[in-house]
Image (cartoon, rainbow, N blue to C red):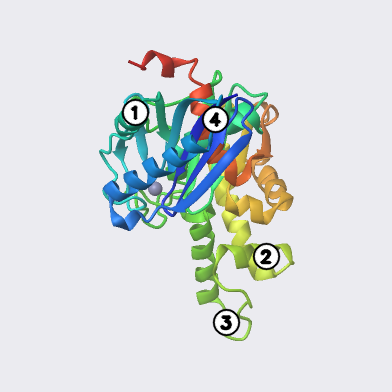
Amino acid sequence: MEWAIGVDLGGTKMQFAAIDRQGRIGHRHRVPTNAKAGPQQVMDRMLEGIGRMMAAVGPGESVVGIGIGSAGQIDWRNGEVVYAGDTLPGWTGTPIRRLAEERFGKRTHVDNDVNAAAVAEKLYGAGRECDSFVCLTLGTGIGGAVFEGGRLVRGAYGGAGELGHVPVDFNGPRCGCGNNGCIELYASGPGIARLGLEALEAADARDRPAWEPTAGDIVRAWLAGDAAAARVMDTALRALGAAVAGYIHAFNPQAVVIGGGVPEAAGPAFLEALNREVRSRTTPGMSGACRIRAASLGADAGVVGAGALVWDCGESRQEHWR
Ligand SMILES: [Zn+2]
């Protein structure tokens, strides 16, 4: 039996798993990231977690390699962090691949966490029959990844696919990236909460809605038929529809695969509404060929995809292995 060790490093938690070639999880482990403790501590915890997974693999079985999906912009060729923001303070510049290889002597692949999740959807999930598709994750932020001809589109420095920072209103609120009106400010969890807060502040004291301005509360109220929540979700869905229409015109994909906490909480009604919005904003030749579908691997996509980086190394990854 051969295993790949996958690591999904996010701002709040680190997940570890041993996965087989079919993407099935054999062993798993999870710890808080404790990002505030600094990069050295985060790296130590990660190496410790990998060691624990290696020890969990039974005698007569082997670990073929290690795959790590990390938040931030990652140079997938040398496995270093090009840039990580406030999610992982001080993480920029960390030579993740070198440190993991020195410790374990196993071939190690490092990529952006959203790219890793998209690899999982490509190999085992909603992107399986697609060579060209776009992945979107709507959660704390909006992550994106683009596949073209069966390969991830990476750009010159590994940063391609930052679809959350495509603006839908150039006069909109300021985004952390420096631009205004990025889609992340409207259709991520915090984006929906922000729209909800605006609606609450504008509402008359008498007909103030009963929900709190959190994405979870707003989505629940929307599904229950609350009119004020419906107006908030309508704004979020129009913004998202405009952005997805833009991705479809840019990449002419076979599918747009949408995952993350927001669509998971909102269910099929969310994708149906988004689909209508996108159809009204795209040329028939583009939208007719493109399916909007739910991601199928849920919260495991990141860690399974990280492990799958080891199996998916037939392409250009191989060339960069010394
Ligand atoms: Zn932005």
In the rendered image, which residue does mark 4 sit on?
119
Q: Secondary structure at mark 2?
A: helix
> Which circle's residue, 3 or 4, is located before the other in the chain?
4
Is residue 246 in view from this perspective? no
> Which circle's residue, 1 or 3, is located before the other in the chain?
1
Q: Position of residue 292 (x, y in %)?
A: 67, 37
Work out how far the residue at label 3 is from the one at label 4, CA to CA, in angstroms.
47 Å
The disc labelled 4 sits on which kind of residue? Val
Label for residue 220? 2
Q: Is residue 276 left or right of residue 20?
A: right
In the rendered image, which residue does mark 1 sit on?
101
2 or 3: mark nearer the eye: 2
Q: Is residue 42 left or right of residue 267?
A: left
Q: Look at 55% across and 50% down and name the residue there.
A: 239
Q: Is residue 176 or residue 238 the one in the foreground?
A: 176
Work out how far the residue at label 1 is from the one at label 3, CA to CA, in angstroms.
60 Å
